[in-house]
Image (cartoon, helix red, strand yellow):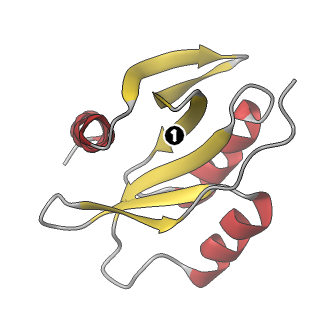
Amino acid sequence: MTEFELVESLVDYLTAAGYLTCKEIPSFEQSCDVVGLKDGQIIAIVAKLKNWKRAIQQCGAHELGFDFIAIAMPEFKRGFPVDGKKILMEKGYGLFLMNQSGEWRIEIEPRQNHKIW
């Protein structure tokens, strides 16, 4: 699987859930892989195949402009690292995971971001 395929699958999932979606949206000095709009709220999602630490780091760049922030990744064979989940929960970021069958689930619900500019 490529990151492009991961993003396309995520967009399909979000669209089916009622989101309007866009890909590769500029956000300050970076870009969001996927941005979704639903019920007047905007979520920024960073998609990565493996490097969850980098994904969390990139989420920080989006805190000033989005209502919710999350990362999206394929499931790891041994599960998502506990220390990674802890960091996500502390920061209020969500975690979307795709299983080997291509089905998505929300492992950690993102919290409302109050750092919006």
Residue at horizontal 51 percent and vertical 40 percent from the top = 45
Seen at 59% across and 83% down, the residue is 82
The residue sitting at the front extreme is 39
Residue 4 position, x and y percent, is: 27, 33
Work out whether residue 18 or residue 103 is closer to the camera in this orientation and state it. Answer: 18
Percent from the top left, x then y, of residue 11?
A: 30, 35
* Quadrant that contains the C terminus: top right
Q: Is residue 21 left or right of residue 98?
A: right
Say which residue label 1 marks.
45
Q: Which residue appears at 44% of the width and 51% of the height?
A: 72
Q: Position of residue 17 (x, y in %)?
A: 31, 44
Front residue of 20 and 53: 20
Residue that sits furthest to the left in the current view: 101
Q: Is residue 116 left or right of residue 20?
A: right
Vertical arrangement, residue 31 with respect to residue 78, above or below:
above
Label 1 crowd (10 A; few <14 / some 14-19 / many >=20): many
Q: How many marks?
A: 1
Q: Position of residue 7 (x, y in %)?
A: 31, 37
| Residue 62 to residue 105: above or below | above
Which one is in front, 56 or 9?
A: 9
Q: Amino acid at mark 1?
A: Ile
Element type at mark 1: strand
Q: Residue at x 71, y 32 (%)?
A: 62
Quick check: 32 left or right of 103?
right
